[in-house]
Amino acid sequence: MKYGIAIDSSRCMACYACFMACKDEHCGWDTTVSKAQPHMGQFWMNIVEWERGDNERHIKTATVPTPCSHCDNPACMAAAKDGAVYKRADGIVIIDPEKAKGQKQIVEACPVGAVYWNAELEIPQKCTMCAHLLDDPEYPGKEPRCVEACPNQALVFGDLDDPNSEVSKKIAAGKVTQLEALGDAGSSVVHLNVPSAFIAGTVFYPAEEEEVYIGAQVKATCECGKVYETVTNWAGDYEFEDLPKNKKFTVEITTKDFQTVNFDVVTDADHYFETYLAK
Amino acid sequence: MAKERITHSICVGGPLTIHTVDGVIRRVRPIVLDDTDPQGWVIKARGKEYTPQRKTTLSLLGFTEKDRTYAYDRVKYPMIREDFVETADGQNRNAENRGKSNYRRASWDEALGLVAREIKRIQSTYGKEAVTAITSSHHSWGLVGYKISLFNRFFSMLGYTRIADNPDSWEGFHWGTPHTYGYYWRLGGPEPFDMLHDAMKNTETMIMWSHDPDTTRGGYSAQESALWRWWMKEMGIQFIYIDPFNNFSSVKQADKWIGPRMGTDAALCEAIAYVWITEGTYDKEYIAKHGHRFDEWADHILGKGVDATPKTPAWAEEITGVKAADIKAIARRWASTKTMAGSGMRGGFGGACRTVGGTDYARLLVSLLAMQGMGKPGQNMWTGTCGAPMNYNFWFGGYSDPLASIAKSPIADHPAVNSVQQTLYRTNLPDAVLDGHYEWLGEGFCGGGLDFEFTRHVYPMPGCSEVKMFWRYGGSFMGTMLDTNKWVKMYQSPKLEFVVNQDTHINPEGRMADVILPACTNLERVDIGEVGNSGNGGYCSHSQTGNSWQVVVYQDKAIEPLWDSRSDFWIFSQVAARLGWGEEFTEGRNEEEWAKRFYQFSDLPKHMSWEDFKKKGYFIPAVTFNEENKDPKTGLYEKWDEHPGFQWFAEERPCDTPNHKIFQEEGKLGTLTGKFEFVSESMLYWEPDDEIRTPIAQYKDSWEGHKSVSADKFPYQLMSPHPRFDYHTHYQQHATWLWEIPQNRRLVNGNPYLVARINPVTAEKKGIKEGDIVALFNGRGTVLCSAHITRRVYPETIHAYTSSGIYNPVEYGKYGSVDKGGCVNVLTPGRLMGDYIPAMVPNSCNIDIEKAEADPNPGQGFEFIIDSLEMQSKFRCEKTSAEADQIFGEKEAK
């Protein structure tokens, strides 16, 4: 039995239900495994958000709910003295609030910034995956509060060791995109579909025509050799999503009746291009 | 675990499961269905099956209910303004100090005695009409406690000048679309019935115009419909979002976003029509049959009308800023695929309709839908919010149901009838009070007929007194109504001899009262209600189809009223008793007994006993009870009774939708001709001279907008749509967890500044950096915000959410003071849409922006908040006033 949460960024709309449910559960109340979270200032379920794109015509946001990853080999555990951080048999990583007193290095050890310092109690604190609820046979819910709160099935909880569990199926069907800060390290919280970079654009007829060009062939060739191809849609738009980052791409736009357009672009960020065709 | 008690309730964020430990709220959760709850509907579409999750959802606001209940700014005791003097003639009461003065703690006896004495004095001196009162909207949920029930019963029995609500969230549809397609009884909105099923089977394109469904959540349907839209997205339906702000739904889900300049949506509609007419891509047969005076309108579009201007995409590009190429692409996509389109929250809402051109936009949007054969499969007026399958044969009252009120039969043995005819109009209450005279047209909510929009009103009514006493129940108008400073001025006028505020929290308007009465929250008293049900036959009928499940809840008291707060029912009963009609008011019933009356007159007793209902806390009816729809093999219901909205009209059969009028059974719409009126006969009949709402809907430059005179001084347009992180101001000031969302507020010098969104070009020009404090200002006032630099708005637009909950002037109680709470309605115009249209237009608002300094004094005017934050964890468990005294007594009594 290994408890885990799959977090699908493509389904997350940053509605903050998970964030609030977490605060509702932990602020002001001790549990069997943790001290009360201060009323404000800690985000055991933090929503990391950034805006994507360099042109108003094509902007997206990435929204990544980021609790403790409950790593297979937790850096916080390695940094802790006296066994103040321990990993349970079910994979949940817990900070013992008694033993961890004064151990600020536990906060600093976390690569994703998921551990917070409680200045009043002088303890490090973080997500417990609601272990106190999972352990409680009388508690009527079956999931951590954040998962129960998610309206979009962006968060799915279950047994990672069971290939037929909902969480295992979600992970198997999705694209695993581990947080960059964790490198290749394994963890019980698995991130899916965190976006990387897009190249997008709109193809127009020559400006005086005031028309988008539908059906233009667009080819993006990565310096790594991989080729991506698409066709402009009803809006004259094309998009290559989730490209490898920091690679040089050559984009080629081909039509029947106009000159072929070529340009280079680096996926250091998300880029959008307006292209007006010419005879 | 500690012994936990589980009860249920409802808030505007959804239905609540509440856990309490020893009389203290431990947590709030959604409802997770159990095995005794029915099977959900199953929609089969495009080779897959879709069924709702076996749980209800809560918006983030619902999850703050505990924080809000134990909030630092609860009204803890009855309070009387320190320098209030109970003079015999109502004069010399230091009214000008309202908003500045402190309060002293009073006993309930003293406060209620004063209120009762003042009612008697004022009504016997001036007449019954000298008392006026109004509630906030959606400050609570439940059929006993809601405004048309309890409040209505008390004030109708008392006799008072009623204040009519304006349709503040959907002005353009309310005052516009009835003249194009009828539906005045739905207040201008469409029929969403069973549209989810239709869309999932048939639709190829969704046009979400002025619509942010993940934010407005179908009104009060939590995040129920979010999953539906993901299903539709994943089956390949194209989503087009049209909104000056690349809103929170759009930025995650749009296949195409276009951002027209604020208030120019009507021009975009006209250009789309131009493309269709010139390319012949509209449903000519449908229009020939169902359109009225279409050819005249088409001539106007083609430039053969009086203005001799063809409404070409290039013409619209000039006005809207949207590329002509994009307009053509969208017009062609719309015409060539099965398309659903609608505006805002439930299809007939949205910020675009709350501009000066709001009625034009709303009517033109309906005209476009007609041109594409509205009501044919997959083609309708719908925005992916309401319209889930429901059991139309299960009746439980909604909050605006004519029959579901304790003021009326059959719930009450003796209905309450107001003896006063005089009325006031909410948006202009300050003008009426200050000037002593006000005239306007229309009944506010005009569900009774097209003519209701043109009734003439004058205040004071001949022979009637002006109002002298204002009993405010809730405190949201300084935040939701426009030109906030006008309200400050009204409250400080000695013409109001006595002001009562009855509220759960100290809201901005609470700080303007002479007496503050502490009401308890929904979680501290008993009530009953259905989630999201605004009334079957009332306002936006059958809005509970915004939920995946129909949920009727016994809203049990989770905890005892905190501090000295009492239920609204108790407060009104006490005043009634002091006025000599306490027994008549209560009819001998307590709140639970009133709640049971709603149960008894509903369909619920057929399914569940009162005791079982109270014990379980909620009931979910199956989507159908029709045995014919049962699959004999599986035992599951795979079909249900469907009454798809507007399809009866396109298919030319008698109307079968719920909430319909008799003339619909003859295939007619609710316009004068029964057809889609492209030239409005009702406008020609009632107000042919109106220059704002013209018989032919069309784009016109706004009296406040990018081409108006004030644009020279204030060149940016403020867009202030319905908020994502609040609801009618009811959460933001109280639930401080909301301040920690960076897209919402940022704490600077202890003050939570509201986020204002500006384009990088604007930021560069003004020298503004991310997180800088900025002043948004115009001739009406100044609001300090925190700048968020984003490409989700174009350079001319500045976005800051309205109703975001805090009005916090740097100089409290000073007319015109700079606000640092983010009350952007300080900036919006108090002027109505037009002389003949009593609509407010917050999104026609020109401003300028400059970098500013944060207010150095965090406590000023906000002392309740800052001082008590650190004490929050200590007092959140306080239950008795005696214990609370030790912490707060001294401070608040000062």
Image (cartoon, rainbow, N blue to C red):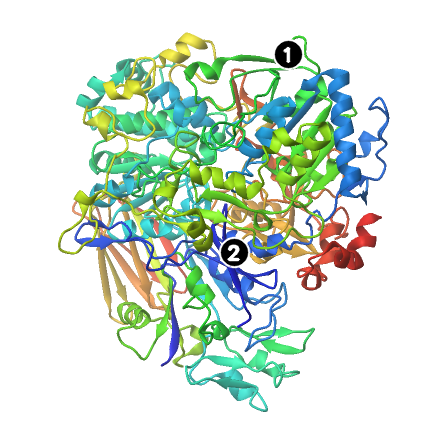
In the rendered image, residue B864, in percent from the top left (x then y), is placed at: 74, 51
In the rendered image, residue B338, in percent from the top left (x then y), is placed at: 22, 38
Number of the label disc, if any, that sits on residue B461: 1
Cα distance between the residues tagged 2 and 1: 46 Å
Return the chain for callout 2: B
On the picture, is B147 further left or further right than B775? left
Residue A94 vs residue B317, the one in the foreground? A94
Please indicate, yes or no, whether residue B797 appears anywhere in the rendered image.
Answer: no
Amino acid of disc 1: Met
Task: Name the element at disc 1.
Answer: loop
Residue A192 vs residue B96, the one in the foreground? B96
The residue at the point 38 percent across, 18 percent down is B179
Please indicate, yes or no, whether residue B372 appears anywhere in the rendered image.
Answer: yes
Q: Which residue is mark 2?
A: B63
On the picture, is B24 further left or further right than B176? right
In the rendered image, residue B541, in percent from the top left (x then y), is placed at: 39, 33
- State yes or no: discs 2 and 1 in contact (Cβ < 8 Å): no
Say above or below: A32 vs B214.
Answer: below
Task: Tell me the quarter of the picture where residue B186 sits.
Answer: top left
Residue B581 vs residue B180, the one in the foreground? B581
